[in-house]
Image (cartoon, coloured by chain):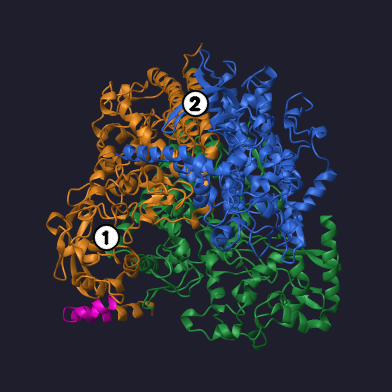
Chain colours: A orange, B green, C blue
Amino acid sequence: MLRHFRILTLCSLAALFCLVPAQRGLAQDKDDADDIPVSDATSQCLACHEGLHPGIVAGWRKSRHARITPAEGLKKDEQARRVSSTDIPEELQETVVGCAECHTMRSGKHADTFEHAGFQVHVVVSPDDCATCHATEREEYKDNLMSQAYGNLVNNPFYQQFVVSVNGHMARTDTGKAEFTPSDPETYAESCLYCHGTKLSVNGTKTHDTDYGSFDVPVIEGWPNQGPGRINLDGSKGSCTPCHTRHTFSIAEARSPATCGECHSGPDVPAYKVYDLSKHGTIYNSKHGDWDFDAVPWTVGKDFRAPTCATCHISEVVSPDGTVIAKRTHAVTPRLPWRIFGLIYAHPQPAKADTSIIVNQDGIHLPTTFDGDIAMDFLIGEKEQDARTGNMQAVCRSCHGASWVEHHWARFENTIKVTNERTRAATKVMSEAWKDGLATGLDKDGNPFDEYPERLWTGVWFFAANHVRYASAMAGGGDYGVFERGRYNVSERFIELNDWVTNQKIMKQPKGK
Amino acid sequence: MLRHFRILTLCSLAALFCLVPAQRGLAQDKDDADDIPVSDATSQCLACHEGLHPGIVAGWRKSRHARITPAEGLKKDEQARRVSSTDIPEELQETVVGCAECHTMRSGKHADTFEHAGFQVHVVVSPDDCATCHATEREEYKDNLMSQAYGNLVNNPFYQQFVVSVNGHMARTDTGKAEFTPSDPETYAESCLYCHGTKLSVNGTKTHDTDYGSFDVPVIEGWPNQGPGRINLDGSKGSCTPCHTRHTFSIAEARSPATCGECHSGPDVPAYKVYDLSKHGTIYNSKHGDWDFDAVPWTVGKDFRAPTCATCHISEVVSPDGTVIAKRTHAVTPRLPWRIFGLIYAHPQPAKADTSIIVNQDGIHLPTTFDGDIAMDFLIGEKEQDARTGNMQAVCRSCHGASWVEHHWARFENTIKVTNERTRAATKVMSEAWKDGLATGLDKDGNPFDEYPERLWTGVWFFAANHVRYASAMAGGGDYGVFERGRYNVSERFIELNDWVTNQKIMKQPKGK
Amino acid sequence: MLRHFRILTLCSLAALFCLVPAQRGLAQDKDDADDIPVSDATSQCLACHEGLHPGIVAGWRKSRHARITPAEGLKKDEQARRVSSTDIPEELQETVVGCAECHTMRSGKHADTFEHAGFQVHVVVSPDDCATCHATEREEYKDNLMSQAYGNLVNNPFYQQFVVSVNGHMARTDTGKAEFTPSDPETYAESCLYCHGTKLSVNGTKTHDTDYGSFDVPVIEGWPNQGPGRINLDGSKGSCTPCHTRHTFSIAEARSPATCGECHSGPDVPAYKVYDLSKHGTIYNSKHGDWDFDAVPWTVGKDFRAPTCATCHISEVVSPDGTVIAKRTHAVTPRLPWRIFGLIYAHPQPAKADTSIIVNQDGIHLPTTFDGDIAMDFLIGEKEQDARTGNMQAVCRSCHGASWVEHHWARFENTIKVTNERTRAATKVMSEAWKDGLATGLDKDGNPFDEYPERLWTGVWFFAANHVRYASAMAGGGDYGVFERGRYNVSERFIELNDWVTNQKIMKQPKGK
């Protein structure tokens, strides 16, 4: 019966659709009750798609895109302006940004463009489409490591060994080894590439039989995906929707810590969980209902009392008198001197967003050797680190005195040093195990992630030392610095690794000894 | 001094109580300042209990029960109506639903009914009481696995072995084994049965000496408990309060994801945690303050922008034009084709809510064998699975295009297949260990959950593979599909199990080899 | 360019600063648009610091301190009054509580007092400063274990061994042992002492060159820190800011569960996480947006529907008719009969806040022996426990019937007994390992936390048994009582410890056996 209802509704909509060309004005009247200028093309989209995907359209109707034209946006004061392009085509300026504006934009560039109801439509809107109005943000984003997240993983042979040991088919061999062989692309798309982004490609078309008739639509491999490093069908890299989710594209959502938490929750990147229990996070948790997450620029103290992720890393932050405390940056890097996760040792940020080019002194695609020597050619130097530290500390000083900030930072850099030392201690035991043949590492062409002691070693730096550094960076983070995968786990994994090595040596010692 | 204050207040209330019969009108005036028709019986309850348990009464006063009579409820349009019974007794229709209405309802049926201040009162209100006004919801709930959660655990011998290895008294035997013996009922009530529900029974009465005099009240074993599968004192199964908490019985609360999280948080059923970091969850976290959680029916896009648990699994969801996208269901099953947690392998949903009847080909109370062969006689078939998939996908399509939904679903079913393969690989190693006598399993009448390698094996399917499937089902879930107990842990537990078996074989090999 | 803007602004402020003495009235007019009486001294602070730290000043401006004078506070009804001192100095009564009021208070007592712009300013405001207006709260807090949290850790030799095994430098010795040596003070400040509080000390001064000129400011070791047991520069112990964060000092924030979660999140003290998924927590999560967190006193049912941490442990809780259900207590102890975390066995609360004086029958600084015998001389007796239980249950009864509360409490005390039994079973295996020389414990002057079996043993009581008790205490807590580090982990750690001991015995048995 439910299905019946639905089909009837769809049929009515289909009937409406046939009439659209003649009734464009009507559709527009209906959609634009408040004199919102929706383009004819978008009105035609809405005529069917509002019934098909009411959630998509309702989300869009509540968005700024649906209520403000680019021309109106351009009239705002520079600090409050949300469009950064100065050359928005005139034909786009006087209607709001609707379905057709984005999904028929630059249609010749997109491999998934298909003819649909008289339009050249593409499914996947890319950052290069968004750049039509948001050119600065798009340019900045090219310098953001996240825009290269696909290649930074897929083109790094060292990490490909990690991937196969995590996602791969598992078997016990006759010799008693755990053996891993690569898994399927769907698994990859759903695991690592969910956050890193997939590489999209068109694989023919498929006929969809709908109540509106039959449509040939492109079959897109790797879709759906909103990873921030997605490889798009126009060749561009990245995606704006992980933070500004379709079809509302909200700045408020991008400033919410939960939004970053989708990919930065841990245990590999525990930023969100650490934030959640930090002093900043607990203030947020108790009071954010009173804050203004939509204001542009974002005023310290007035719009919010404690920072979210965006405050420290991305947003244009100003003081109540309008002084710029930190400039907006979709590159993120300008306030980041150190890279504290994902690699064996913490180290200066990479000089370029494409990290797959990094090779250490031992020829491995890592920014340090296993002993901790830094591949400085590929990383930023001290001067750049200092400049970035200065940018970040300017944000800190909005709410903290100079000596508070200084002492906090000294502790943070001490923690980088100390966690690197702890990692070095564990790596020394692991290297001994590899050398002694208790496990098979890179030196014998083995996968360094597929044996039990190797996982204990990985636990030290990939999980526990990370937690310690994040808790330190955020000046707290409750137990994440100690018992919740922090220092307690750095030492516990070391103790366990050490115990394993000692036991193996006993078990494998020649009889009679 | 505090105690003094309190006693004085109670004495005043006691004095008031004595006067109640003569002053019924007065009490009613006071309680019903806004012309809310409270029954005389309920007014008498309130006269004392408002002072004794102000939180209970305040919660009720804010509820719909306290403000709308059944007669008014029946006048609502069908889609907006919250009472589903068409035969509500006339004597209940014209007063609001207060203390006496529920706690003196069907008093002859309840084993805990006792005489109290002239009324036949029972402590534990059951779904069969609620059915007086909410007949449809109660009927549907009988088909919900949760209504059978007590027996599905307690009557399953396989899972009883799990229970004893988790809750039991622990000791090291002379032969160096870890031995478990059953624990006490209080521990059981507080652990597994907290969510599964306890079996209530009356064990005599106890005299309570209060400031109002002495009262004999029934002593109820297994109380308090609000497990969704509770066995009630009228013989009915289930409880409405886990989701609609007493004494507000709010639909908004039942639609909040945290409410489901009380029992579905993990690591055995990580639904809530996965949701919390999924794209749906992050939109909820950043924006739910603006949504309407009370609207009936629930309109996509208008009342909420992203789904909560209830949206996809239970609620009546409609589009802004009133089209029904999904019918309300307290059975939950109509939108569930697969069962993805709690058992060794993911498999089609059980055909009946009582799963304790399921026996696999090896005579074990499981829907699959240890090798993964499915006990199809007890599970739904492909046709029913397809129908349910269709129901669920209708909800998805509210906000996602058809090819998005299709590709998502293909990945989800691939993940079911792949996680089952991973589990099979681990089970093969475990079975070898059982066969070789390295551990004592079912084949030798051992408990398959009380030895270290058995816990590693359990970790693969009961925790890690679950996380992978939940992350897949919810199209994301951040790290829960990978490093936060996801694929990383599937492989790590396997590696550790494999290592343990290999070491045992070395240790136990005959000397001289 | 950004830096340029900033310097210009600072220069303008510097210019303003020079004019302040002559323009005091002007500054006051500007700051006190609503006739809020700010002192001249505070106006001078604001003239510069509002530009330097806009977030600090904006936070303060929204606070009660910035809007109500002590004289106005004193006029409130006793139940609604937030100042408890009756001898507030007259010179402080008629202006709001601003920068100068706190940071120049009792300047002779503070070791960090320095001359600054004509004032004797100290950086770190202490509870003894706050006591000027909040004398009762400060006195009560002296009886709070948290006020002694520094010494309770640092002066306990047993726990110092734990600290070194968690934070220490790690190395594998030639004999294959994991060896730990003490780490640096910065690491200590950032880990354990982040919550326990650091000991502050002044180590000379440092010249800060700023746009306002050069200032000599004290260098404070151990700063920043807001641990509740901080040792302050006036010799006082404690800090008010962990709960009432500077510079808003909000009661609403202190009543938010997240605020407690900063230090009580686990896995050592999992109170917040357990709360979050308890029935109380899920009601909070779905409905707290409608509650009043600022009301004094706090009225059950009217201001909130479910308790937060503060409700049960600290707040003045009243019924809608004004009856006091629980008196406010910054000592916390009056409602706490049992101590359920941090020590090997659960036991009655310590009699004194300073627990470093506790020594058990074996001469170890613990409230029980390893066998579980209680050092009763240092703990509260049964009578005091009963009184405290009564105080807590009065809060429970606001929303729960007497038999509900009674049965809940019986289960909780049963859980204390049962988890102690489980811990005893694990300790017996551990003690056997120590005795047999498989590990080196206290009996052989070893650190009982630095070997793998010792960490398994620690896992039983320091983490898992804790979770079980917290889940029980809070009547739920979802999976925290079972699979999420609850009973499942109590038994798993035991199984693993047992397996380790058994394997060691096999490996170390004399050849030929």
Residue under pointer 1:
A73
Q: Is residue C453 magenta?
A: no
Residue B506 shown left or right of residue C334 in the figure: left
Q: Position of residue C405 (x, y in %)?
A: 74, 58
In the image shown, does C120 or A438 lie closer to the viewer?
Answer: C120
Residue at the front extreme, as displayed: C22
What chain is tagged by disc 1?
A: A
Residue A23 lies within the magenta run: yes
Q: Is residue B177 left or right of residue B12?
A: left
Give x and y (percent) for residue B430: 48, 39
Residue at mark 2: A494
Mark 2: secondary structure: helix
Cα distance in 3D space between marks 1 and 2: 56 Å
In the rendered structure, which segment of residues is drawn in magenta? A11-31
Work out which residue is located at the far bottom of the displayed protein and give it. B90
Tell me which residue sits at (70%, 41%) in the image: C131
Determine the chain carrying the residue at label 2: A
Instruction: Please tell me whether residue A208 is drawn above or below residue A27 in the rendered image.
Output: above
The answer, for residue C504, to whether it is visible in the render is yes
Measured as percent of width and height from the top left, residue A90 is found at 15, 62
